[in-house]
Image (spheres, grey):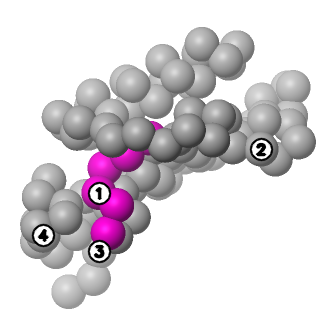
């Protein structure tokens, strides 16, 4: 069984910045993804630079990048993840 896309949204802002949310439901939880989700939430500036990215690539676990600085992210729920991403985008001048 493959992962199933459960959320896929892209937002294009008037200033040229872009936000994208992609979330997959895995067939079953894993030790690295005990919540059973694989995700990438990215906000890029008009020049293509990543300002904010929440993701959980293999061998890194849940983490967040803010202007090039990576730190662990404590995953609580999909709803909280989305809210944290929206808040991070809003503090940089856009709203989703």
Tell me residue 56's x, y (percent).
36, 57
Secondary structure, mark 3, is: loop
Of callouts 2 and 4, the N-terminal one:
4
Tell me residue 83's x, y (percent).
37, 24
Of callouts 3 and 2, the N-terminal one:
3
Look at mark 3 in the image and give the residue it sits on: 3
Looking at the image, residue 71 sits to the left or right of residue 9; the answer is left
Viewer-nearest of discs 4 and 1? 1
> At 27% from the left edge and 82% from the top edge, which residue is drawn?
2
What's the distance in space between the residues labelled 4 and 3, CA to CA?
A: 12 Å
Look at mark 2 in the image and give the residue it sits on: 49
Q: Are marks 4 and 1 in contact (CB under 8 Å)?
A: no
Q: Is residue 83 above or below residue 57?
A: above
Look at mark 1 in the image and give the residue it sits on: 61
Q: Residues within 10 Å of mark 3 (few under 14, many from 20)?
A: some
| Segment tinted magenta in the rendering | 59-64
Look at mark 4 in the image and give the residue it sits on: 30
Tell me residue 32's x, y (percent).
19, 64
């Amino acid at each position: 069984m493959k992962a199933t896309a459960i959320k896929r949204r892209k937002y294009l802002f008037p200033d040229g910045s872009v936000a994208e949310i992609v979330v997959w439901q895995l067939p079953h939880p894993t030790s690295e993804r005990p919540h059973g989700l694989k995700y990438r939430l990215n906000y890029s500036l008009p020049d293509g630079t990543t300002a904010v990215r929440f993701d959980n690539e293999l061998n890194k676990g849940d983490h967040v990048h803010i202007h090039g600085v990576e730190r662990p992210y404590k995953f609580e729920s999909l709803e909280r993840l989305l809210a944290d991403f929206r808040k991070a985008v809003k503090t940089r001048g856009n709203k989703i």
